[in-house]
Image (cartoon, coloured by chain):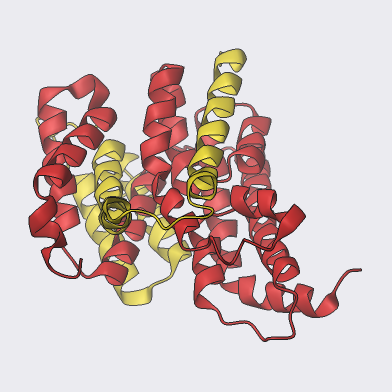
Amino acid sequence: MVDNSYILSAIATIAVVNYFTRVLPFLFFNKSEPPNALIFLEKIFPPVIMTILIFYSLKGVDLTTKPYGAYEFSAVVLTFILHMVFKNYLLSIIAPTIFYMALTQGLIN
Amino acid sequence: MIAKTELLLAFKNSIGVMMGYLSLGFAFALLTISYNYPWYIAIIMSIFIYAGALQFAAIGFFNAKLGLLDIAIASFFINIRQSFYGLSLLKKFAYTKAFKKYLTFALTDETYALLTSIEIPKNIDNKLYYFYLSIFNQLYWITGTAIGVVVGSSVEFNSKGVEFSLSALFIVLAIEQYKSQRSIKPFIIGVVASVLSMSLLSNNMLLGAIVISLILLFLLNKQLGAHGG
């Protein structure tokens, strides 16, 4: 069963840290201009972390046994194509997920 | 004092976010329910955390029973981008008084985008408009989560593979970031850091990759900042 006290303290931790990231600039730069190093990170860090999160979310994939990550790869490609063509969040997330579920559950080959 | 003009304008401008948040909140709740977490976990998270990518990632943390300090550090780096949003809203939020705490709490990627990209008429009370806009967006997020919880708990289905919704979300957000920056370098750094971290430290991949990417950014600072600054 799920350990509720662990989950709830984890949620509290995330909630506090999340609020902290949002309030941070208001605490530090209410009166002064932010330094250049921060402005550099502001631009470049978000796409870096998003790329890392893509890998993080797929790190459980076993490339050494059949189907050698082909399901994940094709679902990633489908997501990419759908979002480039239709630019619709709902479609880009739901459709590849259903496709991936159908693949892993052996509904399509 | 309901201020109808502000309420209507905020609703109109928030419609674009509505579909996105309803569906994403829905997917998030389905994911939570599929791992057998109680129904209220998803709701509590959407009320008190209210951060798309982080809430999805959090389910991974819970499954891995990650320690609280690891969770805090990972959460900080996943959402550090939001600190940068505030930097460009210092002036806009300076006169929002009592609303400021909630506006800051509710500063998601999409709300930030709406606040900074849509021009509003001069006769509008800014702080009320910002407040309504922010609260509409969070209501969509919570509503989507609630619908997902109900559907996920009542409809019996094989949820194997539903975790791909997480990867799909990150891919979509990465594409959106590429569109706004038009530079491939940050993605290369992300790939290099991820691959290095996965081969070096398989059981703490996320933190490892973040640290490696920060080192790479620090080392490549000059080359990366050279164009565009």
Q: Is residue B144 above or below residue A59?
A: below
Residue A61 in view, yes or no: no
Residue B76 in view, yes or no: yes
Q: Which of A84 and B201 lies nearest the eye of the viewer?
A: B201
| Chain drawn in red | B
Q: How many marks?
A: 0
Asked where in the image residue A53 lies, by quadrant, the reply is top left
Q: Is residue A61 above or below residue A51?
A: above
Residue at the limit of the structure toward the front, as seen here = A32
Going 33% across and 55% down the picture, which residue do you hit? A42
| Chain drawn in yellow | A
Rendered-image quadrant of the N terminus of chain B: bottom right
Q: Which of A64 and B13 lies nearest the eye of the viewer?
A: B13
Q: Position of residue A64 (x, y in %)?
A: 9, 30
Going 22% across and 70% down the picture, which residue do you hit? B182
Q: Position of residue A21 (x, y in %)?
A: 48, 42
Q: Position of residue B110 (x, y in %)?
A: 51, 62
Q: Which of A97 and B89 lies nearest the eye of the viewer?
A: B89
Asked where in the image residue B161 lies, by quadrant, the reply is top left
Describe residue B104's horizontal placement relative to residue A50 as left or right.
right
Going 14% across and 48% down the picture, which residue do you hit? B189
Describe residue B95's horizontal placement relative to residue B222 as left or right.
right
Q: Position of residue A7 (x, y in %)?
A: 56, 21
Describe residue B72's horizontal placement relative to residue B46 as left or right.
left
Residue at the limit of the structure toward the right, as seen here = B1
Rendered-image quadrant of the C terminus of chain B: bottom left
